[in-house]
Amino acid sequence: MSALKDVVWDEFLGLPTTAAQAELCGFLEALPKSGGRGTASFACPSPVVGRRLLKLWKSLKERSFSGKITLGGRPIELNRKLGRALFVLPEGIVRDITAGAHESESERWAWFRGLWGGCGALYLPQSGYYMTLRPHGDASGRKAAALLGASGIALRKRVARGRAEYTLRDQDLIVTCLLRMGLVKSSLFLEETAMVRSIKNRVNKVMNCDSANISKTVDAAAAQLAMVDAVDSGALWDCLSPVLAELARMRRINPSASLAELGQMLSKPVSKSTVEYRWRKLKTLLAALGR
């Protein structure tokens, strides 16, 4: 999981800023906000998010805005001890940024990328795949659900700890989502991870199945050898039909053979089901003789 997380955030940080205002809008709608003295402060979950915000802001500022970014001239305040960042902008600029219409498809997905970057996560538990969104405003969640729904991607909504949480649990749809956000390397890494996981699961199933079959064969052989010992101790060979006597002697000679293998070793080879039937018949006979 940590490897995937590193790949996602490394690629996220390095993406171009071609739709900076739309993506920045998504971030600002996702992050918890506080205000004071004409500014708005947004708490970033990590310095990586803070660096992405700063990169988007610089790109947008060069094209759209002028003047100081904050009262102190610094848009990002890093708290390295807590591993968090604070993004601060004047209220008027925040309103300008979040007023964008995002008319094109690329702008809408850039907005979603920002929203997911600010309140989203990707999980790989022992089984399954989970992409989640926990926006601080439900309007943003509904907007994201509508955007993905138009692309055939249905988000599942639930309320967790008083906030709406939107979840996607299909690996193929998660890959599609990552691709739409421009995270190509991350989508390829997830597909590779899914393939390796699938192979490991298949190998484990085969090994478990083989182990169970071996245990079953050993247990069956031990029970059959016990019946042969009962025939010996009671001198009951004359009570057995020729086919049962041959089967019992063949088991004594081949104690580890499977039932199918045992059937093929007889003078007249028979199927596994016939061998099972003959052992049941021998067991019934011994029970009738008090053995």
Image (cartoon, grey):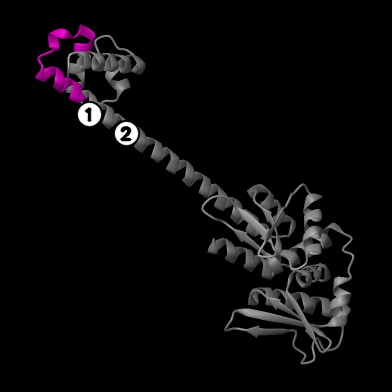
The residue shown at (15%, 21%) is: 230
- The part of the chain drawn in magenta is 225-245
Q: In x, y percent, where is residue 100? A: 88, 68
* Position of residue 68 measured from the top left corner of the image (x, y, whole percent): 82, 89
Instruction: Name the residue carrying label 1.
Output: 222
Question: Within the image, what quadrant is residue 205 found in?
Answer: top left
The one nearer the camera, 132 or 103, is 132
Label 1 SS: helix
Residue 77 locus on image (x, y percent): 69, 85
As displayed, is residue 204 above or below residue 32? above
Q: Tell me the crowding category of disc 1: few under 14, some 14 to 19, or many 20 or more residues within 10 angstroms, Cα based.
A: some
Horizontal arrangement in the rendering, residue 286 relative to residue 125 (left or right): left
Question: Residue 214 got which mark?
Answer: 2
Sort mark 2 into few (<14), some (14-19) or many (20+) by Cα contacts within 10 Å: some
Q: Is residue 200 left or right of residue 134?
A: left
Left or right: residue 51 versus residue 210 is: right
Mark 1 is on which residue type?
A: Ala
